[in-house]
Amino acid sequence: MKEDIEERNLEAELDAEFTMLDLELDAQLEEELSRAVLKTGRGMDKGDDAPADPSQRKGLALITEAHSAI
């Protein structure tokens, strides 16, 4: 009985640690994506909704797709 309680407590601690790590990684990814979007947007002409350079358009599409998956 006592072993079961200790095992459940250990599992709960591990779950909490993994949750914190997951949240930290999500925050880092969000920050990196935001920086990438800002960097990609710098090459845009005034009035354009998309970057003029095809590689930037592809990069922006990939960033947008990854961001929406969060």
Image: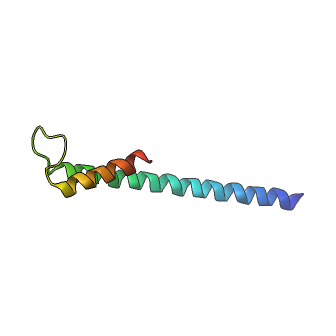
Q: Is residue 53 left or right of residue 16?
A: left
Coloured how?
rainbow
Residue 49, how many percent across, how many down?
A: 18, 40
- At horizontal 45% and vertical 52% (from top left) the residue drawn is 26
The answer to which of 51 and 29 lies nearer the viewer is 51
Q: Is residue 3 left or right of residue 30?
A: right
On the image, which quarter does residue 32 sit in? bottom left
- At horizontal 57% and vertical 53% (from top left) the residue drawn is 19
Can you name the residue that lies furthest to the left here? Answer: 46
Residue 30, how many percent across, how many down?
A: 38, 50
- At horizontal 30% and vertical 50% (from top left) the residue drawn is 61
Residue 10, how many percent across, how many down?
A: 72, 60
Q: Quadrant of the N terminus?
A: bottom right
Can you name the residue that lies furthest to the front here? Answer: 54
The answer to which of 70 and 48 lies nearer the viewer is 48
Residue 42, how many percent across, how many down?
A: 16, 50
Q: How many marks?
A: 0
Can you name the residue that lies furthest to the right here? Answer: 1
- At horizontal 19% and vertical 48% (from top left) the residue drawn is 41
On the image, which quarter does residue 5 sit in? bottom right
Q: Is residue 18 left or right of residue 4?
A: left
